[in-house]
Image (cartoon, rainbow, N blue to C red):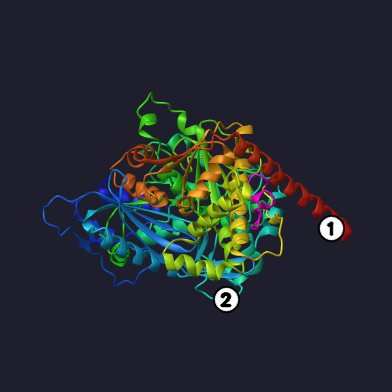
């Protein structure tokens, strides 16, 4: 059997009963019947094209001078799309960002895939310009994004998921909580798959959101041809390959990744059929139609993160991004998980050069601190931890089970506390005039207050202000989306100093929440003793120090601030075959920076232990209040 016949057979085998479009458009076959030059790149299309479309082949026009090997990472967060370029040692060469639009209406939070792609293209071109990197030097590309839900029709066009009917709004954002009731009904099913997500799905996961759309937007449900996690949609848009990531499907769709335990090596992991769906689960929760066509709408082919997709960038995507057609694209990660990949091997040289300890990675937890905070830990044995997502097999680090805790609002909560205070506008103007962040200015105010009041340490300034940070529910370890934020200790004071105290108490409340997660994980089989942190909030020295003091563990910061972008770039490096596995690429491209140690002052520990006890009691009080009011209204 010749190459063409083998390729046609493979494509035919990947067609769905209801989807006659192969995962890879086969237009290129007819145009390259006699061309066996592997140095050429072929064009294939993400979406159906007209019969007049022709296949174009391009070769590099670069002269023979030595080119660098550069890897591009793209990260789509809640508010922006970012691009970063890294060399083979993981050093950042250049980065850029572009804002993305977001619509908020109560619990409904939506975005546009069209807008996001345009923002990505802008960021990639800007990053290449700033880093003085030519398109020929980019050897691989990886994507990461929030775990938001994208709907497209059979032509790849957006399908609205909004009450407004606005077709631009085809993404339900990760933090959208419209599907709380659907999540509760799904969890009442007690399906066996639920044990792999902490005992129940969150309204931030995809099954509840899908059920909400089916029950509330029937026209959209009928029109949708593909439902995709945002990062999977990005690789689909870039390559035309509909293969889904084990990271997204396992962590957010209840896919059982351990069905592929025997396919971990490169040869066996090619063209993996999606055999980890539990059809009974989808039938039971009322979404049995998603099983049709070998799960065509939600994923009939899966791959490990970093697996090279299709034939790389399509010509159209390459043109829009300003890159070379055929550039290898790795199977994607969720943004927090990319942060884990970008930082988890960032251990100080003195540690990494000592006797190799393969279990050391299992004693680390990565905090990815942005709009929300994700808490990522891995283990060789699978650990079922109530209220904590997972265990997810190979969803982040190959051949390890992932435990994923989280806080739904951290950076978002700090913004909320600051921006809704009467002193905020004046404070923001002062910070802007000095070209420093408002966090830096608040930290200065706290230091001044410590001196003026003779406080033994800054932390002690909040001895009568206590905050439960569940303003967007509790993701872990209580797993209560109905939990509310609480503030104890308010007065009529509306000064900048009072805002500084509220800010400090909020930082502490967030850190107590992380301590609760760490303690809960360790009580259920983990042996975490070291934290690694990345994300925008880690640029705030007070935020990091409070976490170290409150949890009592050292916190390692990475050499490169942009760990999520680095994790994404690692996917491109693996796809390009620069490194054989994600783990090997992590070891080569991760590097440690500053290590923040907890205070050795026993008074600081005693103080935080007392406040932590109050923190835990706040939720208990809330439960009592909720019960009393429910009884009163019954």
Element type at marker 1?
A: helix
- Mark 1 and mark 2 lie on one chain; the one further toward the N terminus is 2
Per the model, the C-alpha gap separating discs 1 and 2 is 37 Å
The front one of 269 and 492 is 492
Q: Secondary structure at mark 2?
A: loop
Q: What label does residue 20 carry, if any?
A: none
Residue at the image position 19 percent from the left and 55 percent from the top: 34
- Residue 362 coordinates in the image, percent (x, y): 50, 33
Q: Which mark is residue 629?
A: 1
Image side of residue 258 versus residue 139, left or right: right
In the image, the segment drawn in magenta is 462-478
- Which picture quadrant has residue 586? top left
Q: Is residue 53 visible?
A: yes
471 falls in the magenta region: yes
Q: Main secondary structure of the magenta part?
A: loop
Residue occupied by mark 2: 165
State yes or no: discs 1 and 2 in contact (Cβ < 8 Å).
no
The number of numbered badges drawn on the structure is 2
**Depth order, front residue of 505/220:** 505
Query: Where residue 611 sits in the image (x, y, percent)?
Result: 67, 44
Category of crowding for the residue at label 1, using alpha-carbon neighbours closer than 10 angstroms: few (below 14), some (14–19), many (at least 20) = few
Residue at 54% x, 50% y: name it.
Answer: 373
Position of residue 198 measured from the top left corner of the image (x, y, whole percent): 63, 43
Q: Is residue 77 above or below residue 367?
A: below
Q: Which image quarter is the C terminus in?
A: bottom right
Q: Is residue 556 magenta?
A: no
* Residue 228 visible from this viewpoint: no
Left or right of 585, for residue 211: right
x and y, in percent, of residue 289 in the image: 60, 58
């Amino acid at each position: 059997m010749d190459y063409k016949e083998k390729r046609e057979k493979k494509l035919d085998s990947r067609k769905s009963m209801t989807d006659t479009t192969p995962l890879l458009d086969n237009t290129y076959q007819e145009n390259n019947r006699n061309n066996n030059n592997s140095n050429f790149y072929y064009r294939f299309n993400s979406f159906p094209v007209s019969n007049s479309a022709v296949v174009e082949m391009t070769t590099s026009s670069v002269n023979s001078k030595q080119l660098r090997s550069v890897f591009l990472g793209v990260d789509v967060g809640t508010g922006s799309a970012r691009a970063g370029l890294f060399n083979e040692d993981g050093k950042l060469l250049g980065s850029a960002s572009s804002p993305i639009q977001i619509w908020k209406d109560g619990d409904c939070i939506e975005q546009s895939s069209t807008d996001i792609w345009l923002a990505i293209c802008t960021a990639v071109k800007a990053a290449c310009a700033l880093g003085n990197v030519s398109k020929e030097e980019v050897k691989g590309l990886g994507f990461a994004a929030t775990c938001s839900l994208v709907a497209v029709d059979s032509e790849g066009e957006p399908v609205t998921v909004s009450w407004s009917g606005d077709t631009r709004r085809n993404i339900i954002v990760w933090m959208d909580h419209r599907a709380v009731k659907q999540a509760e009904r799904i969890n009442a099913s007690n399906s066996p798959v639920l044990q792999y997500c902490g005992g129940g799905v969150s309204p931030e996961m995809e099954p509840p959101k899908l059920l909400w759309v089916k029950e509330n937007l029937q026209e959209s449900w009928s029109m949708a041809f593909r439902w995709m996690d945002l990062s999977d949609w990005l690789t689909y848009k870039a390559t035309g390959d509909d293969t889904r990531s084990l990271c997204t499907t396992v962590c957010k769709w209840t896919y059982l990744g351990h069905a592929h335990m025997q396919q971990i090596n490169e040869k066996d992991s090619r063209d993996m059929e999606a055999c980890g769906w539990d059809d009974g689960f989808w039938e039971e929760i009322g979404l049995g139609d998603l099983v049709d066509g070998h799960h065509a709408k939600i994923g009939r082919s899966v791959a490990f993160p970093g697996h090279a997709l299709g034939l790389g960038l399509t010509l159209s995507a390459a043109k829009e991004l300003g890159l070379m057609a055929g550039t290898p694209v790795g199977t994607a990660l969720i943004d927090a998980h990319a942060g884990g990949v970008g930082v988890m091997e960032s251990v100080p040289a003195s540690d990494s050069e000592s006797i190799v300890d393969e279990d050391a990675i299992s004693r680390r937890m990565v905090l990815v601190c942005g709009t929300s905070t994700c808490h990522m830990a891995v283990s060789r044995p699978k650990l079922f931890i109530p209220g904590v997502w997972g265990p997810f097999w190979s969803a982040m680090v190959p051949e390890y089970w992932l435990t994923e805790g989280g806080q739904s609002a951290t950076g978002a909560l700090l913004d909320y506390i600051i921006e809704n205070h009467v002193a905020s506008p004046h404070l923001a103007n002062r910070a802007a005039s000095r070209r420093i962040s408002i966090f830096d200015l608040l930290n200065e105010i706290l230091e001044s207050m410590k001196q003026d009041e003779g406080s033994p340490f800054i932390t002690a300034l909040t001895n009568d202000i206590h905050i439960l940070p569940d303003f967007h529910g509790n993701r872990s370890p209580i797993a209560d989306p109905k939990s509310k934020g609480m503030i104890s200790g308010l007065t009529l004071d509306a000064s900048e100093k009072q805002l500084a105290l509220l800010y400090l108490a909020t930082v502490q409340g967030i850190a107590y929440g992380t301590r609760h997660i760490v303690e809960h994980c360790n009580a259920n089989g983990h042996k975490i003793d070291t934290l690694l942190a990345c994300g925008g909030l880690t640029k705030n020295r007070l935020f990091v120090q409070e976490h170290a003091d409150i949890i009592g563990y050292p916190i390692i910061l990475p050499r490169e601030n942009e760990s999520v972008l680095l994790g994404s770039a690692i996917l491109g490096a693996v796809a390009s075959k620069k490194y054989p596995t994600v783990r090997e690429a992590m070891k080569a491209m991760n590097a440690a920076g500053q290590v923040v140690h907890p205070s050795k002052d026993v008074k600081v520990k005693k103080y935080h232990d007392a406040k932590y006890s109050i923190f835990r009691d706040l939720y208990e009080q809330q439960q009592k209040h909720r019960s009393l009011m429910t009884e009163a209204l019954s």
